[in-house]
Image: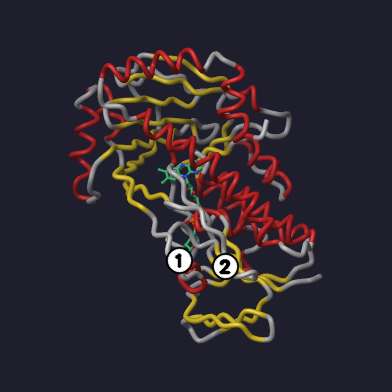
Amino acid sequence: MKKKIAIIGAGIAGLTFANLIKKNSDHEFMLYEKQESLSLDEGYGIQLSTNTIKILNIIGFNKIDSTKIFHPIGVDFYNIQNKKICDLDLTQFNQEKSKYTTLQRSTLIEFLKDDIYTQHLRFGKKIKEVSELKGKVLIKFDDNTNDLVDLVVGADGIFSNTRSFFEKKKNEPEFKKAIAIRTILKTKSELNIDDEKISLIMGKNCHIVIYPLNKSKEFNLVCIVRDKKYHPDNIKLLVDRVISQNSNLKKAFEGDLKSWPLYSTPRILPSTNSKVFYIGDAFNGFLPTLAQGAGQSIESAYELFNLIEEDKTDIQNAYFQVRSKRATIVRRRSNINFFSFHLSSSIMQVIRNFFMKFLLKRKRFISSYLGTVYKN
Ligand SMILES: Cc1cc2nc3c(=O)[nH]c(=O)nc-3n(C[C@H](O)[C@H](O)[C@H](O)COP(=O)(O)OP(=O)(O)OC[C@H]3O[C@@H](n4cnc5c(N)ncnc54)[C@H](O)[C@@H]3O)c2cc1C
């Protein structure tokens, strides 16, 4: 049955869901974004694993300008002295049309917005009030406009405001006592890394991830540093803490640095309203240490889209079953990585490196630890 759907939030999750609806169904929809424009200057990179690319190909990602994306062939793990510990072959997860991909977030948003922008996206919209009317949901926005819809899809990120209108139980995101610092490198500078791969450098209470973003080999650098408090003015101090472990890293941090605190959602909770769904970070926010945040946003949009298309009776329950199972798998692995990438004791680091070398050679381990996430 044809439905009218309001999507709240035009991030990766909301835009993916909108594309699926637009290109593969007859449902009516509108995407409501609180900002006045899409943040296309937000240049940080994202990694998309093969399962995500498969979904994006359904909405035409295979036609994207190939110079704007990159297919890293593996991950090299280093200690903070830039000495290689071991590596992981990423091509083992690739298929002909869906390869592990890195790109700028803005490239993905540009692609996702193309077919939605003019007719289906409204800016400067924030929910003021919600109520039920004749079996539908009436949404009133703070600019005094409203919409009467069959379904609401909350895609407004980890601090979801939509949840606060529909859910009594709070699920406040937790600050994970870690800060992300990002910059773009024009060259791999003095680092001894392979520019066809993702490089993961592990230090004391910090780790750095560097990867090419496109065919012109601009590199994304994200450094996660553990610290009890976040203050943008203290970023230099945090960077100094990293550089003090290897002075060769200094050059890598000389560009424009952006920072943000890392949060994750403590519990995975279902929606209590049969007409309201949460996708992406609004469903559950992960730590970035498995590089699956955007991927899970895309997957959750696809799962919900399929269930709505099938027009099952209990979509809410079916969606929560499948989504919570996936989120639990990803959350567990993101947390394990978060712990092991930041060890401060040198003895623990030696033990970790030994186990990493051992485990990354084991096909069975790789297929259960990563294959289940990448759905291989
Ligand atoms: C350091 C770091 C590195 C990362 N690296 C990766 C990676 O390599 N791979 C990966 O897959 N993921 C990565 N992620 C995670 C990924 O970026 C996020 O998980 C993903 O962007 C979430 O998408 P979303 O659409 O759910 O939410 P968001 O991107 O947060 O979008 C939410 C949208 O809703 C809007 N909004 C908010 N409130 C309202 C409101 N009240 N009304 C209307 N609109 C509203 C916002 O303005 C925004 O446009 C990383 C994250 C971090 C912090």
The answer to which image quadrant residue 348 occupies is top left
Q: Position of residue 149 (x, y in %)?
A: 66, 77
For the C terminus, give its image quadrant.
top right
The relative height of residue 369 versus residue 312 in the rendered view (above or below) is: above
Camera-side residue of 238 and 341: 341
Q: Position of residue 118 (x, y in %)?
A: 63, 68
> Would you name the residue on which mark 1 appears?
169
Drawn side of residue 362 relative to residue 223, left or right: right
Type of amino acid at the residue the image marks with label 2 = Thr
Query: Element at badge 2?
Result: loop
> Would you name the residue on which mark 2 appears?
272
For the N terminus, give its image quadrant.
bottom right
Badge 2 crowding class, 10 Å Cα cut-off, few under 14, some 14 to 19, many 20 or more, is some
Camera-side residue of 186 and 153: 153
Report, in whole angstroms, how far the alpha carbon at label 1 lies from the one at label 2.
9 Å
Camera-side residue of 204 and 126: 204
Q: Name which residue lies at 53% across and 40% down.
A: 330
Give the mark nearer the N terminus: 1 vs 2. 1
Q: Position of residue 203 (x, y in %)?
A: 30, 25
C-beta proximity under 8 Å, tags 1 and 2: yes
Q: How many marks?
A: 2
The relative height of residue 353 versus residue 126 in the rendered view (above or below) is: above
* Residue 30 shows in this picture: no
